[in-house]
Amino acid sequence: MEHPKDVGDRSTLAIILALHARGFTVLLPFGENTRYDLVIDDSKKMARVQCKTGRLVDGSVIFRTSSSYVHHAKPKVPTRTYLGEIDQFAVYCPKLGRVYLIPIEDVATKQYASLRVEQPRNGQLKRIRLASAYEIGRVAVS
């Protein structure tokens, strides 16, 4: 089984490649203790971005929208949201090779969020986030 840090590093690399191809300047923070993984600059404004690896499940890309601390001995808080600490999530789905950029206010931040890749069979579109609205690139990273 692959180490989670390696999976995350590959996702971050794919995200950086997609952002660069879209014309963003990508800035990387020094050190490991920031709540965001990178900062993007579109020459008008800067945004703090948290990179995530998405999993394809039943036609949707699922990704975590909070940090988990349950692997620590006696954590004070088992999960922590990113509210007020980031501006956007960038999600790479390895199975699809696609990268998505989602403003934090567009998703629930308690645990998980999903982006629908396929149209629902019943045609429902209310309260559905279509992945195509957030897709910024396609990247193959192996």
Image: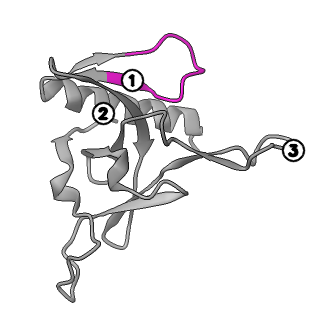
- The mark lying in front, picked from 2 and 1, is 1
Q: Is residue 61 left or right of residue 18?
A: right
Q: Which residue is mark 3?
A: 74
Instruction: Name the residue rendered at 25%, 38% in the picture.
Output: 140
Instruction: Name the residue rendered at 21%, 89% in the picture.
Output: 122
Q: Secondary structure at mark 3?
A: loop
Q: Is residue 123 left or right of residue 67?
A: left
Amino acid type at circle 2 is: Ile
Up-down relation of residue 54 to residue 51 (above or below): below
Amino acid type at circle 3 is: Lys
Residue 33: horizontal and vertical position, in percent?
60, 21
Residue 77: horizontal and vertical position, in percent?
74, 46
Q: CA distance from mark 3 to mark 1?
A: 29 Å
Crowd class of label 2 (few under 14; some 14 to 19; many from 20; radius 10 Å): many
**Along the polypeptide, which appears first: circle 2 or circle 1?**
2
Highlighted range, magenta: 28-39
- Which quadrant would residue 106 be assigned to in this image? bottom left
Residue lying at the far top of the rendered structure? 30
Q: Secondary structure at mark 2?
A: helix
Up-down relation of residue 66 to residue 110 (above or below): above
- Which quadrant would residue 99 be assigned to in this image? top left
